[in-house]
Every structure is written in C-alpha cells, then in structure tokens.
Image (cartoon, grey):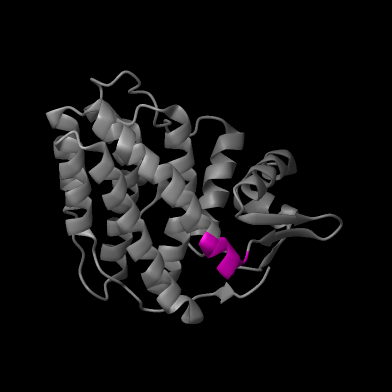
C-alpha cells in the first residue's frame, strides 16, 4: 500500500518540476507538528480502509495508536469531520463517515466544478515543457490487473496527475479543493479494490487533457476534463451496489 509520505514526496517532486510557475510552493511538505502528523495518519487510515465506514472509534484508542495525547486527536477529528470523513456524535464518540449515494453525487459534482475550472485555467495560462513532461509520465502510469499493490500505486499517480493540473492553474484555492476531492476519490478507489473491481486506466483521457493544455485550448481542456469525470462517475455508480455504499445518510 502506498503511504502518505510517499505520495507527499511525489507531490513535492511535481511541485519542484513546476518551479517556473509563480507559486511552486502550493504542495504542502511532510507534516511537521504532532497535530499535523496525527491528522495525516488518521486521515490515511480512513482513506485506506483501516477504519471501515460506520465504525465507532474511541478517542483513547486513537491516542494510543498515534502515540499522542487526546488533544491532537480531538483536533484531527474536527478537521476530518470538515473533510466529510468522520462524524462526531456528542456523548457517543467518533464514527467513520458512511459512503452514501448522495456523497458520491456530491463528490462528482464538486469535482466537475473545480477540476474543469482548473483544466481551463491551466490551458489559458500555459505550462512549461518540464511540467507537461512530468504530468505525461503520470498520465502513462500503468498497473497489473488484479494486483492490489500495483493499483494502489496507480491511484497515487492518478492523484498526483489531477493535483498537478490544479497546480498548472496557479490558484491556491483550486489546488486545495482538488486535493480534498482526491481524498474522497482515493477512498472510493481503494474500496473498489477491496471488492476486486479494478476498472480501467484512463491514460488516453489524461493525455487528451494534457494535449489541450499544451495547445492552449481552454474550452477543449474544460470539456475533456468534464467528459473524463462523468465517465468515472458512470463507472463508480455502476458498481455502487457492491461497494460499502448506503442509499441514505
């Protein structure tokens, strides 16, 4: 299983590759404070399915797991509730957020809004050849059928690709929004692996988006990103009946 630290390293490499842009610092570095480390580890465990949807979690057990006091755990829980990955129920504790059909729709509507805008801005503002090469390498990431480790690495590359498009837009709010959406997507994609659904690698779609950005064609970049996201939505909805998805909250 790819680790958050590994993904963070890839993001930093991508950010370095995009150093000619006006904001090369957009990707965060490895968490430095205890509070940040607890938040990152807790978030990773939810995304990677260590904690299952609906599972009740004890603050005391979490503090022991992350080798921290209850205060940073409490702070992490509040952030994860804002991320829609955790529910805090007064006098009862923490519960891992369920994946519902409404959540799926929300994720894809959000992705369509922010990632189409990012692709459009990236094409309008342009990108260096070095940045496009790095993103092309990510777009060409492959994986072996029925191999969980291989698919986990592909998911890592897929996230780096989509965040990379947002980086090209040179807009901090879009980078943050896309990163948040990818947390939800990674959770869905890893859950799909757990029921042995591996889907298809969207290499052609990714390369088409990059070509539109290279050609400085904002309208095409936006439309191709929208088509890509809607195709992904159709695939996910097609297997929703066997994913840990509830019809209601």
**Quarter of the image that includes the C terminus:** bottom right
Where residue 230 sits: x, y (%)? 37, 61
Q: Answer left or right for 56 relative to 6.
A: right
Q: Farthest residue in the right direction?
A: 91
What secondary structure characterizes most of the magenta part? helix
Residue visible at 24% across and 45% down in the picture: 220
The question of residue 64 being in magenta is answered with no
User: 107 or 95: nearer the eye?
Assistant: 107
Residue visible at 20% across and 69% down in the picture: 144
**Quarter of the image that includes the N terminus:** bottom left
The magenta segment is 98-105
Looking at the picture, does residue 115 appear above or below residue 124?
Answer: below
Q: Farthest residue in the bottom direction?
A: 242
Q: Is residue 19 visible?
A: yes
Q: Is residue 184 visible?
A: no
The question of residue 102 being in magenta is answered with yes
Looking at the picture, does residue 210 appear above or below residue 184?
Answer: above
Query: Quarter of the image holding residue 127?
Result: top left
């Amino acid at each position: 299983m790819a680790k958050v630290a590994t993904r963070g390293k890839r993001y930093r490499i991508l950010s370095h590759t995009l150093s000619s842009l006006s904001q090369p610092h957009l990707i965060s570095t490895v968490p430095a404070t205890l509070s940040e480390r607890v938040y990152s580890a807790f978030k990773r465990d939810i995304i990677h399915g260590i904690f299952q949807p609906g599972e009740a979690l004890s603050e005391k057990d979490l503090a022991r797991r992350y080798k921290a006091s209850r205060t940073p755990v409490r702070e992490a829980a509040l952030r994860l509730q804002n991320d829609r990955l955790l529910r805090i129920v007064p006098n009862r504790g923490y519960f891992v957020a369920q994946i519902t059909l409404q959540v799926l729709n929300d994720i894809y509507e959000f992705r369509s809004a922010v990632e189409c805008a990012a692709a459009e801005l990236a094409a309008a503002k342009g990108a260096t050849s070095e940045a496009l090469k790095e993103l092309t390498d990510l777009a060409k990431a492959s994986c072996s059928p029925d191999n969980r480790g291989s698919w986990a690495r592909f998911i890592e590359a897929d996230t780096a690709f989509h965040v990379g498009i947002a980086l090209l837009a040179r807009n901090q709010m879009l980078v943050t929004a896309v990163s948040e959406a990818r947390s939800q997507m990674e959770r869905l994609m890893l859950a799909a692996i757990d029921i042995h659904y591996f889907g298809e690698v969207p290499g052609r779609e990714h390369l088409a988006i990059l070509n539109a950005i290279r050609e400085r064609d904002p309208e095409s970049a936006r439309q191709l990103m929208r088509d890509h996201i809607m195709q992904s939505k159709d695939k996910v909805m097609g297997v929703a009946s066997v994913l840990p998805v509830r019809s209601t909250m």
